[in-house]
Amino acid sequence: MNTVISKFEQLTSFFNHLKQIDSDTFYEPIDDNKWSTAAIVAHFHYWDQKIASERLPVMISGGKTNGWDGTVEAVNRRAATYARTRSMQELIDQAIVSRLKLAERLHACNLATEFQVDQKTYSILEYVEMLCKHDEQHVKEVASFLYSSYIGESIHSLQINS
């Protein structure tokens, strides 16, 4: 079992931890002009599905493809809109399922297979490593928000009880 794919799959643990937060916090933007945790979870779900259906077949065959270009913003907008129409439980469960399905397919790949995106060559392993770094950025953003929300609530609670 490849450790990079296992790390990629471990995002599901983060999703499971999110089940412990309250719904209001889940749907609250993590900062000014930023997504909510719900939108970030939907973002993972949408992109895992898109990678599985569009990019992975090219990767496995060692083919060539264009970058996402204008697709990125459109997919992100759809994910953010979708997040507002689903329950916290549903969003988290969908993200877990799509991540596990993609990870399962990646486990079955020859990770040394090379493919091209916009004239740049990557191995499947390198691509998954980039995805893991992207995941880490979002996890850090959410964790920071949740930590500051928790600290803020704790301080507010202390002030009220004083």
Image: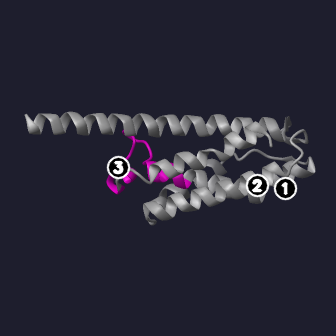
Compute the Cα span from label 2 to label 1.
14 Å
Residue lying at the far left of the rendered structure: 162
Q: Is residue 29 magenta?
A: yes
**What's under tag 3, amino acid-wise?**
Thr
Residue 126, by quadrant, is: top right
Q: Residues within 10 Å of mark 2 (few under 14, many from 20)?
A: some
| Quadrant assignment for the C terminus | top left
Q: Is residue 66 magenta?
A: no
Residue placed under numbered mark 2 in the picture: 104
Element class at badge 2: helix
Question: What residue lies at 32% left-to-right and 54% top-to-bottom?
Answer: 24
Image position of 157 with respect to 57: above or below: above
**What's under tag 1, amino acid-wise?**
Pro
x, y percentage for residue 53? Answer: 76, 60
Camera-side residue: 93 or 53? 93
Question: What residue lies at 21% left-to-right and 33% top-to-bottom?
Answer: 155
Residue 33, by quadrant, is: top left
| Quadrant assignment for the N terminus | top right
Residue placed under numbered mark 1 in the picture: 57
Camera-side residue: 23 or 58? 23
Compute the Cα span from label 1 to label 3.
37 Å
Tell me which segment is drawn in magenta.
23-42
Residue placed under numbered mark 3 in the picture: 25
Question: What residue lies at 60% left-to-right and 45% top-to-bottom?
Answer: 11
